[in-house]
């Protein structure tokens, strides 16, 4: 199979979230499909409908990747109502729970610092563009010159 026909076959397939049980039945060869009775087909269809995830609405759906040297990392952030089943097992290891809590805390602190730096930089640039000075001759460059003159 050459690259063009592989790309065309990939483009014709429905996206994962758009697949229906019929798409999975179409993947079977025709002999296998014809061997199913109507009752079996209905049972498998109900099972597939239950198994195929149904995405819910999200307040935040942020997906991006980061190239870091020779590696590519895929980052996903979803914020929305938890609609998962409650019978999901929790982490049994305390170390895993602590690690997840520390990672979440570090991400929140990093995001907070990033937003704070951006807001302060924006405020400083607006202040400089308007020409307003909180203290006379107190720009960063002036302070650095005074430090160099003292030494």
Image (spheres, grey):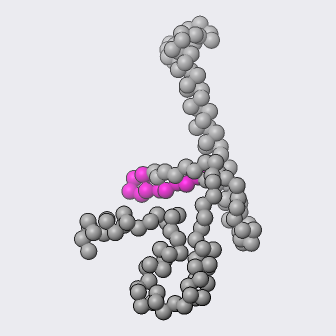
- Residue 92 visible here: no
- Please, is residue 1 above or below residue 77 in the view? below
State the image quarter where residue 84 is shown: bottom right
Residue occupying the point 41% across, 67% down = 13
User: Magenta span has 74?
Assistant: yes
Q: Is residue 103 left or right of residue 32?
A: right
Q: Which residues are magenta?
A: 67-77
- Please, is residue 63 above or below residue 145 in the view? below
Q: Nearer the viewer, residue 40 or 62?
A: 40
Residue occupying the point 56% across, 21% down = 124
State the image quarter where residue 44 is shown: bottom right
Q: Is residue 128 left or right of residue 99?
A: left
Q: Looking at the picture, how far across and down is residue 59, in whole percent? A: 64, 48
Q: Please, which residue is most extreme toward the bottom here? A: 35
- Residue 110 visible here: yes
Residue occupying the point 58% across, 71% down = 52
State the image quarter where residue 114 is shown: top right
Q: Looking at the picture, how far across and down is residue 10, in whole percent? A: 36, 67
Q: Nearer the viewer, residue 73 or 13?
A: 13
The N terminus lies in which quarter of the figure?
bottom left
Q: Please, which residue is most extreme toward the front here? A: 38
Query: What secondary structure characterizes most of the magenta part?
Result: strand
User: Magenta span has 70?
Assistant: yes
- Please, is residue 64 above or below residue 16 in the view? above
- Please, is residue 105 above or below residue 40 in the view? above
Q: Nearer the viewer, residue 34 or 84?
A: 34
Q: Looking at the picture, how far across and down is residue 8, in whole percent? A: 31, 65
Q: Looking at the picture, how far across and down is residue 60, in whole percent? A: 61, 48
Q: Please, which residue is most extreme toward the top here? A: 136
Give the number of callouts: 0
């Amino acid at each position: 199979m050459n690259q063009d026909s592989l790309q065309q076959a990939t483009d014709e397939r429905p996206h994962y979230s758009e697949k229906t049980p019929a798409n999975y039945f179409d993947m079977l060869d025709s002999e296998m499909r014809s061997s199913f009775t109507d009752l079996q087909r209905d049972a498998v269809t109900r099972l597939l409908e239950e198994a195929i995830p149904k995405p819910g609405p999200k307040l935040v759906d942020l997906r991006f990747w980061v190239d870091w040297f020779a590696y590519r990392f895929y980052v996903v952030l979803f914020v929305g109502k938890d609609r998962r089943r409650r019978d999901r097992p929790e982490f049994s290891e305390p170390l895993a729970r602590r690690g997840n809590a520390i990672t979440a805390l570090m991400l929140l602190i990093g995001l907070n610092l990033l937003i704070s730096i951006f807001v302060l930089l924006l405020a400083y640039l607006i202040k400089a563009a308007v020409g307003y000075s909180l203290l006379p001759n107190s720009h960063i460059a002036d302070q650095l010159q005074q430090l160099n003159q003292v030494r």
